[in-house]
Amino acid sequence: MTAPTGFTDITDELAAQAIELPSWAFGNSGTRFKVFGTPGTPRDPFEKIADAAKVHELTGLAPQVALHIPWDRCDFEALATHAGQLGVRLGTVNSNTFQDDDFKFGALTHVDERIRSKAIDHHIECIDVMDATGSRDLKIWLAEGSNYPGQADMRGRQDRLHDSLAKIYDRLGESQRLVLEYKFFEPSFYHTDVPDWGTSFAQVSALGDKAKVCLDTGHHAPGTNIEFIVMQLLRLGRLGSFDFNSRFYADDDLMVGAADPFQLFRIIHEVIRGGGLNNPDVAFMLDQCHNVENKIEGQMRSVLNVQEMTARALLLDTAALTAAQESGDVIAANDIFMDAFYTDVRPALAEWRTSRRLPANPVQAFRESGYQEQIEAERVGGTQAGWGA
Ligand code: LRH
Ligand code: MN
Ligand code: MN
């Protein structure tokens, strides 16, 4: 089996790659129509970490796990110790202001000072959790907005958002960060208070250097050139993290690289171009739900998809591409770009994994490991990801 030209030159970058898994991907999830229960589903955060550690053990790609508060509320020091014993670390802490009746008309943007304080306090609690777990990033996604024109004072809400975020920002430790995630719709359908990268950028820029933007790939209108946004945020030094997933229609939260591998390739190309690959300032996270597929396998498939598209993007002949671009040779430039995308790196990656004492085929190794049978026998009454809780 011959590896693609240049494969040996990219193995250091591949070895350094680290992707953060979401704890909620291991819980039961579904749509507003039905949440399917799955045998073996974790009953608590400790079991979610165990499943995440299995993904890392078999792929070598996922050393960190993101938490969601309140879904993962527990003894966080014990959880961090448990994670360490299983060879992983606790990562980003996600706040949640979307499941409390008080926040029906807003949380950080609410007109009522009492409600805003409650929402700010929740974020302070999340930073307390970060202190206990040693996590660096607080990720804020807000479900706030309105459904009808005239329902809300959009401008007033923007001002209140700034005031609330500034209070949260002030509580961050020296090496902690805040990442603000945008989303153009849902659960609000007319306006969202942080709908796009520009709003997130404006809000985080007004806070300070420890505030960055989180880009969730499923949070854009269909047809959006997401790699352009990646390029721009890296250029501006404000890309803090990715929530990777893929989508056909809306915020589908499907396995990254499943719906549109070419888009993932294009995004990673811009990450590399902008110096964001294996750069600690840019966290690679997954934000997915596995409604019908096996959750551990779904997470494995996802990190392997990211790895595959990273390898292809690293193999791009950038010198030839630049020459073609600068000489105005449109066809040659596009050919060079597509050559990298069409390179099948799977056999080379399988061989390289074996050389690092990882299974050539991690999903098959998982199926042969007996882990799924073991958790199905041991865990009775698994919990939902939090969506239906
Ligand atoms: C919102 C979102 C956000 C939440 C997660 C569960 O759609 O992407 O990141 O924290 O889903
Ligand atoms: Mn997200
Ligand atoms: Mn989402």
Image (spheres, rainbow, N blue to C red):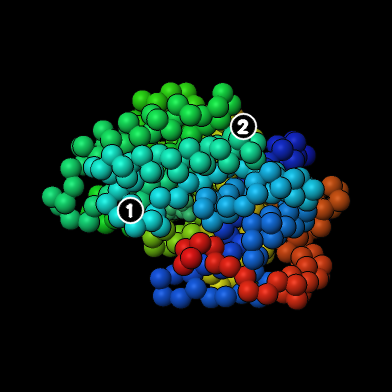
CB of mark 1 within 8 Å of CB of mark 2?
no
- Mark positioned earlier in the residue sequence (1 or 2): 1
Left-right relation of 111 to 169: left
Mark 2: few/some/many CA within 10 Å (<14, 14-19, 20+): some
Residue 279 has which mark? 2
Helix, strand or loop for disc 1? helix
Question: Residue at point 46% right, 76% down?
Answer: 34
Quadrant housing residue 278: top right
Whether 355 is drawn above or below 120: the answer is below
Name the image quarter holding the N terminus: bottom right
Helix, strand or loop for disc 2? loop
Quadrant housing residue 12: top right
Q: Alpha carbon of mark 1 to alpha carbon of mark 2: how far?
A: 39 Å
Whether 96 is drawn above or below 8: the answer is below
Whether 36 is drawn above or below 74: the answer is below
Q: Is residue 269 visible?
A: no
Foreground: 66 or 243? 66
- On the image, the x and y values in percent for residue 153 come to 18, 42
Furthest residue to the left? 150
The kind of residue on which mark 2 rests is Asn
**To which residue does mark 1 refer?**
102
Foreground: 231 or 52? 52
Between circles 1 and 2, the one closer to the viewer is 1
Question: Residue at point 38% right, 29% down?
Answer: 166
The kind of residue on which mark 1 rests is Asp
Mark 1: few/some/many CA within 10 Å (<14, 14-19, 20+): some
Q: Is residue 23 visible?
A: yes
